[in-house]
Amino acid sequence: MKELHIDIPVQFFALDELSEADVQLIEQAKAMTSTSYSPYSHFCVGAALLLSDGQVFLGSNQENAVYPVGLCAERTAFFAASANAAGVPPVALAIAARNANGFVAQPVTPCGSCRQALLEAEIRFQQPIRILLYGTEGVYVIPSMRALLPLTFDGSDLL
Ligand code: THU
């Protein structure tokens, strides 16, 4: 028997250590928490997805009385980008989240479904998506969606 250990590279930055462009994307994600429709969880998530041509698509979580019908902020932004800027690769995604006490101290990470959806874009465009996760204590920077979803299942497994 052999055991595999898979490392996930996570950099932890103070906001003032990040580039102006990264801070701006994070600010857009933070602002989007105010458009969250989350009467059930009261958890407001915002996402800002930067494309390779400089366009930014924004999203927030959208809930429904039939709970599974709702959608996370990340996929709301990603599907809007994919529908409105078809063929343009995403290159960075900022995520911010707020609960009743304000912005979370420890960053929130994307759920499994969002990882799977965004990983497919990485594979399709052969371009990593940097992930910027905002918390009041600092920002996690992860180099790619693949890093967040090791032992991936993708289209190549269907062949
Ligand atoms: N949510 C997101 O939008 N993104 C995440 O990364 C984590 C969770 C939403 C889904 C649901 O509306 C609420 O947060 C509580 O799970």
Image (cartoon, helix red, strand yellow):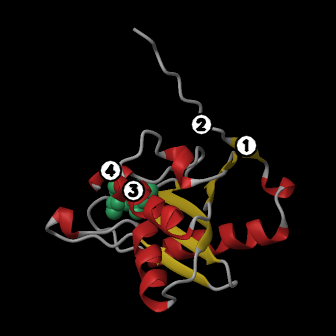
Residue type (three-letter) at the residue carrying disc 2:
Ile
Position of 58 compared to 116: left or right? right
Q: Residue at x 45, y 79 (%)?
A: 35
Crowdedness of circle 3 by 10 Å Cα count: few (<14), some, many (20+)? Answer: some
Which residue corresponds to mark 2?
A: 8
Q: Quadrant of ligand 1?
A: bottom left
Residue type (three-letter) at the residue carrying disc 3:
Gln
At which x and y percent is residue 25?
68, 71
Real-space Cα separation, disc 1 to disc 3, in angstroms: 23 Å
* Screen quadrant of the C terminus: bottom left
Which residue corresponds to mark 3?
A: 116
Residue type (three-letter) at the residue carrying disc 4:
Asp
Nearer-the-camera pick, 71 or 106? 71
At which x and y percent is residue 152?
41, 45
- Closer mark to the observer between disc 2 and disc 4: 4
Which residue corresponds to mark 4?
A: 157
Position of 50 compared to 17: left or right? left
Position of 91 compared to 17: left or right? left
Which residue corresponds to mark 1?
A: 12
Q: Residue furthest front?
A: 159
Tag 3 secondary structure: helix
Q: Is residue 19 above or below residue 154?
A: below
* Screen quadrant of the N terminus: top left
